[in-house]
Structures are given as structure tokens and as C-alpha cells.
């Protein structure tokens, strides 16, 4: 149980252990990039991101149209990752570097920063050793390591979301409004990479700031809450509003938009057999999803009519599908829309195939995954146990955002790849449960003669 305790009788080794974890995680990612051969990495979604990026660079237009000059503007995908990719392309060209290798290196750096953020968020509601444990899981996560080698959004989304949660938590804890503004900007940038994140900002504000909302007899406290909430929410509202205004002005009515993507994901999510049929033949014209799309078209009214009829006809089947099967599918290990396991696009070989150490890490993490997911779900009980502590709100904001984003994917398309940006939050929730179990056991067996036990509370010292 000492694993999750920060008590020590001598030198504080935490900075050294954290440095070792960061070095290990960063090195693992660099070695993976160097020791992995992806078969045609610029394909599928990645190919479209490069088209978007080239159109931004060459035409100043956000579009995945590669046939027309000038390209037709659209809003089918969010602009964050293509813009990030365009910046990488320009930087690589200016430095005479290979674009894809530069992208992989930058994403390895983002992966290392994600490990660091995991620790600094964790110490707000757990012990230092527990925080080290959570950051170690992030460092060794095969999914997070693998995703950094692709030109896909997961690594950037993961970093920006965790940055936003960390800044918001430190801002409330330290009473610094500038951190809340920076958190709001981070949420806004994360929204531009993955629009699902937009729901996280109000959830975070509600969980972190609700304690002052009932202070009726303290006008100053209520005014502080209003200002803090505005500091957190206004940046993302401005960013989202600017993107919506651009779409209204530049994108023709009836053009490809995020709305058409959403209806497609809802249709996919309605069919339990989609993944099996798709993996057998991605272009099967008899795939129920394809048939549904032709019937429903782009009509939400028609979709809900079809969905309502099916649920009414087989209520037990669909309740089980949405309440049990889809959450488990979302958090399953093996990626469905891709090669499988931790790979999206096919790899000829990877570090997980050629290195015994990497293979051992992969095997251990895969064995632990269902148990970590289960303990993460059970974190709600750990949060209930600490409900009167000052750190409870930080843990609750991590848990609630994980649940809310998961719920969006459960309603639409549940695919294991979509849960990868939430791995740090899952590991934090799992570690919280394990830490509270350790605290309980230590309290039961470590009582002194008077019957009182010792309980460690996290503190908010920025020096850590």
C-alpha cells in the first residue's frame, strides 16, 4: 500500500522519479516512431487532413476539395488539426526537414507534455506517489504511444483537453483568474480539433465553481463565481462563435458540414453489426448502415423516426446496446475502424513487434486495461468517500468530463479509437480508486493505540 502513499523518512525522490517517467515516455515515443514502418501513413482521414493543410497553405481556404481551383470551402471537419498540420509543414519546409518525421517528433513532445500534465493534475486530488503511478500509465500506454505516429487528431486532442482541465483546476485552487482564461482558450483550441470537447467547458465550470453558487449571503463570493465562470467560458464561446460565423459566411448552403458527419455517426451508432460487416468489406452495399443512410438521407426527423420504431420493436435489445454494449465497445482495447489492436493504419512492423521490452509493456498494459477501466468506473465511490474534502471537485471534474464525452460517443458512434484521447483521464480515475482503497486499508491497519488513523490529503503547493 506504500505505492500510493507520499510519506517518506528521507529525501524526496518525487522529482527524480517524475523525470525518469518523462524521459521513459518521451524516449518510448521516439523509439516507436523510429522502429515502426507504417504502410502508406497518408491515407484515410490523414490524407484529407493533408489536403486541408495544403489548401490552407496554398489557397488560404479550409476545404478538403482537391479537384477544384480554387477549392470549395467546407466545414465537414474541424479546422484545428489541419491548421496544426499546415504549421508543421511550413516549419519543416523552412528547416529543410522531412514533414512526416517532424510531425511525429512534435507529437512525441506533446505526448511527453501530456505525461507531465497528468502528474500536475493528479497532485491536486491524490498523493504524489499516486500521481506518479497515473503518469507512469500514461507514459507506457501503447495506444498513446502508437497514435503519435499517425497524422490523426488523437494526440493533439488528448494534450489540449488535459491542458484545459489542469489549468482550470489550478486556477480555481490557486484563485488565479488568468489560469481560467488560459483554460478557456485551451478548451477552445481543443474544440477546434474535436468539436465534442465543447461540452467539457460548461461541465468543468459547473463542477469547479458550483460551491459558490449557493452563497446567497455572500454577494462578493457570488460575484467572484460569476467572474470566474465568465473567464472560463467566454474564450471558448468566442472561438466557437468565430468558427460558426466563418461557416455561415463562407460555406454554401447544402455544402458538406459537421451536421452531415453527425447524422452519419448517429446512423452508424444505431446498427450493432456495423463494425463486423465493415471489417469484412468496408464497401459492402448491403451494410445496414449504408441502407439506412439511403433511407434517412440527411434528415434528423427521419433518423429519430427510424430509431424510435426500432427501439419500440426491440426495446431490450437496444437498451442493452446503448447502455452496456456500446460503452464497453468504446472502451475496448482493439481499434475496430483500422488494423486492430493499437494500430489504425496497417503497420508492416512496429516496436511492439521487434522489442521484447516494448512487447512486455504492451502485454502488461493490455492485461491491465479491463481492470483499469473497471476501477475508473468505480471512482465515483472514491469521490463519494472524499466528498467533504477540498480536493473532491478536482477529481469530480476529471470523472464527469470522461463520462460526458463517453456519453456523446455512446449516443453516436462507439469506436475504441475515440476513447484514446481520454486515456489520461481514465488512468487518473483508476488511480483515484486504487489510492482510496490503499488509504482505507492503511487507515484500518495503521491506527494508533487511541484508535485514530492517519489520512493523507493532497496539498496544492506549486513547488511540487
Image: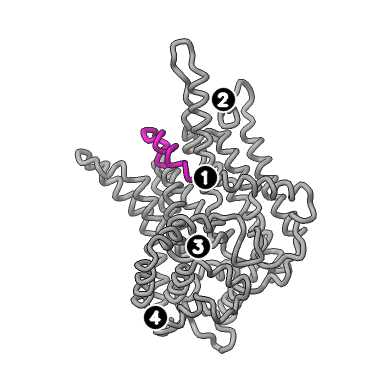
- Marks 3 and 4, Cα distance to the nearest angstrom? 33 Å
Q: Nearer the viewer, mark 4 or mark 1?
A: 1
Foreground of the two, 328 or 387: 328
How many other residues sit within 10 Å of disc 4, few (<14), some (14-19) or many (≥20)?
A: few
20 relative to 116 in the view: left or right = right
In reply to whether residue 385 is colored magenta, the answer given is yes
Q: Sequence-wise, which precedes: disc 3 or disc 2?
A: 2
Q: Residue at x 46, y 79 (%)?
A: 293
Circles 2 and 4: CB atoms closer than 8 Å: no
Q: Residue at x 71, y 64 (%)?
A: 101
Q: Sequence-wise, which precedes: disc 3 or disc 4?
A: 4
Q: Which mark is residue 7?
A: 2
Task: Tell me the residue that label 3 is attached to.
Answer: 414
How many other residues sit within 10 Å of disc 2, few (<14), some (14-19) or many (≥20)?
A: few
Residue stretch rendered in magenta on the structure? 375-394
Label 1 secondary element: helix
How many other residues sit within 10 Å of disc 1, few (<14), some (14-19) or many (≥20)?
A: some
In reply to whether residue 94 is colored magenta, the answer given is no
Q: Sequence-wise, which precedes: disc 4 or disc 1?
A: 4
Circles 1 and 3: CB atoms closer than 8 Å: no
Task: Tell me the residue that label 4 is attached to.
Answer: 249
Task: Tell me the residue that label 1 is attached to.
Answer: 374
Q: Quadrant of residue 307?
A: bottom left
Foreground of the two, 275 or 153: 275
- Marks 2 and 1, Cα distance to the nearest angstrom? 28 Å
Expressed as whole percent of the image width and height from the top left, the position of residue 341 reads 65, 59
Amino acid at each position: 500500500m506504500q505505492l500510493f502513499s507520499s510519506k517518506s523518512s528521507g529525501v524526496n525522490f518525487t522529482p527524480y522519479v517524475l523525470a525518469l517517467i518523462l524521459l521513459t515516455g518521451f524516449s518510448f515515443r521516439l523509439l516507436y516512431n523510429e522502429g515502426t514502418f507504417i504502410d502508406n501513413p497518408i491515407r484515410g482521414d490523414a490524407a484529407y487532413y493533408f489536403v486541408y493543410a495544403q489548401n490552407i497553405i496554398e489557397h488560404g481556404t479550409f476545404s478538403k476539395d482537391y479537384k477544384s481551383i480554387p477549392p470549395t470551402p467546407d466545414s465537414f471537419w474541424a479546422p484545428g488539426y489541419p491548421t496544426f498540420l499546415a504549421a508543421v509543414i511550413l516549419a519543416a519546409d523552412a528547416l529543410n526537414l522531412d514533414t512526416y518525421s517532424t510531425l511525429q517528433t512534435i507529437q512525441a513532445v506533446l505526448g511527453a507534455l501530456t505525461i507531465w500534465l497528468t502528474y500536475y493534475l493528479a497532485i491536486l486530488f491524490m498523493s504524489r506517489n499516486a500521481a506518479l503511478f497515473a503518469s507512469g500509465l500514461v507514459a507506457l500506454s501503447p495506444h498513446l504511444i502508437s497514435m503519435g505516429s499517425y497524422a490523426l487528431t488523437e494526440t493533439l486532442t488528448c494534450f489540449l483537453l488535459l491542458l484545459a482541465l489542469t489549468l482550470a483546476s489550478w486556477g480555481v485552487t490557486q484563485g488565479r483568474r488568468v489560469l481560467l482564461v488560459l483554460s478557456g482558450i485551451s478548451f477552445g483550441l481543443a474544440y477546434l480539433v474535436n468539436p465534442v470537447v465543447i461540452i467539457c467547458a460548461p461541465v468543468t465550470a459547473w463542477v469547479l465553481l458550483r460551491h459558490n453558487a449557493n452563497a446567497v449571503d455572500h454577494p462578493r463570493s457570488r460575484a467572484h463565481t460569476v467572474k470566474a465562470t465568465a473567464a472560463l467560458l467566454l474564450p471558448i464561446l468566442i472561438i466557437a462563435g468565430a468558427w460558426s460565423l466563418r461557416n455561415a459566411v463562407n460555406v454554401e448552403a447544402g455544402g458538406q458540414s459537421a451536421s452531415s458527419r453527425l447524422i452519419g455517426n448517429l446512423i452508424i451508432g444505431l446498427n450493432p453489426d456495423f463494425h463486423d460487416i465493415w471489417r469484412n468489406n468496408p464497401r459492402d452495399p448491403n451494410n445496414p448502415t449504408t441502407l439506412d443512410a439511403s433511407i434517412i438521407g440527411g434528415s434528423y426527423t427521419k433518423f429519430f423516426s427510424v430509431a424510435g420504431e426500432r427501439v419500440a420493436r426491440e426495446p431490450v435489445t437496444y437498451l442493452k446496446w446503448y447502455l452496456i454494449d456500446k460503452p464497453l465497445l468504446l472502451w475496448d482495447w482493439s481499434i475496430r475502424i483500422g488494423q486492430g489492436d493499437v494500430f489504425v493504419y496497417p503497420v508492416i512492423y512496429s516496436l511492439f513487434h521487434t522489442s521484447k521490452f516494448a512487447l512486455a509493456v504492451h502485454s502488461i498494459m493490455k492485461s491491465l486495461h479491463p481492470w483499469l477501466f473497471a476501477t475508473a468506473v468505480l471512482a465515483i465511490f472514491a469521490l463519494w468517500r472524499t466528498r467533504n474534502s477540498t480536493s473532491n471537485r478536482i477529481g469530480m471534474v476529471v470523472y464527469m468530463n470522461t463520462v460526458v464525452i463517453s456519453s456523446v460517443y455512446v449516443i453516436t458512434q462507439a469506436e475504441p479509437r475515440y476513447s484514446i484521447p481520454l486515456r489520461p483521464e481514465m488512468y487518473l480515475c483508476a488511480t483515484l480508486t486504487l489510492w482510496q482503497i490503499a488509504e482505507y486499508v492503511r487507515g484500518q491497519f495503521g491506527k494508533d493505540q487511541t484508535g485514530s488513523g492517519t489520512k493523507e490529503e493532497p496539498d496544492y503547493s506549486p513547488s511540487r
